Image (spheres, helix red, strand yellow):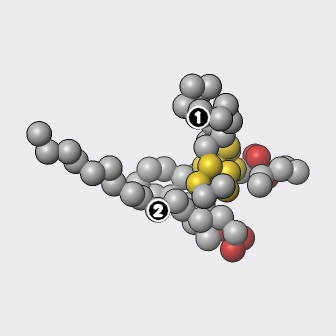
Amino acid sequence: MCDAGCETQWYPLFARANDNKDGRRQWAFRNWPVYTHVHDSPDKPIGDGEDGVWHVLPHIPTPVQKL
C-alpha cells in the first residue's frame, strides 16, 4: 500500500460511492489496492516495474455481445 510519502508519485484510484457494493472507496485488483503513477498516460504507463513492486494491471477486454 502507498503511505508514508509515496502519495506524491502514486495516486489511489478512487471509486465512486455506488461503484462497490461493499462501500470501499478505492479500486482493488485481486485484493491489492490500485494506484496510478504521476507520469502514467493511457497509451504509455510509466510506473510498471517501479521499485520491483509496482505493476501495470492487465488489460482484459470486455467481450462484445452479439445481438
**Secondary structure under the numbered disc 2 in the rendered image:** loop
Relative to the observer, which residue lies in front, 2 or 17? Answer: 17
- Front-most of residues 6 and 61: 61
Q: For the residue labelled by badge 1, is the local secondary structure a helix, a strand or a loop?
A: loop
In the visual, does 62 lie left or right of 33?
left
Mark 2 to mark 1 CA distance (whole Å): 20 Å
Residue 50 in the image: above or below residue 16: below
Tell me residue 55's x, y (percent).
59, 65
Hey, which residue is sitting farthest left in the picture? 67
Quadrant occupied by the N terminus: bottom right
| Depth check, front residue: 22 or 2 | 22
Q: Which residue is mark 1?
A: 20
Q: Residue at x 61, y 43 (%)?
A: 27
Residue at screen point 67% across, 31% down: 23
Q: Which mark is residue 58?
A: 2
Classify 22 as above or below 27.
Answer: above
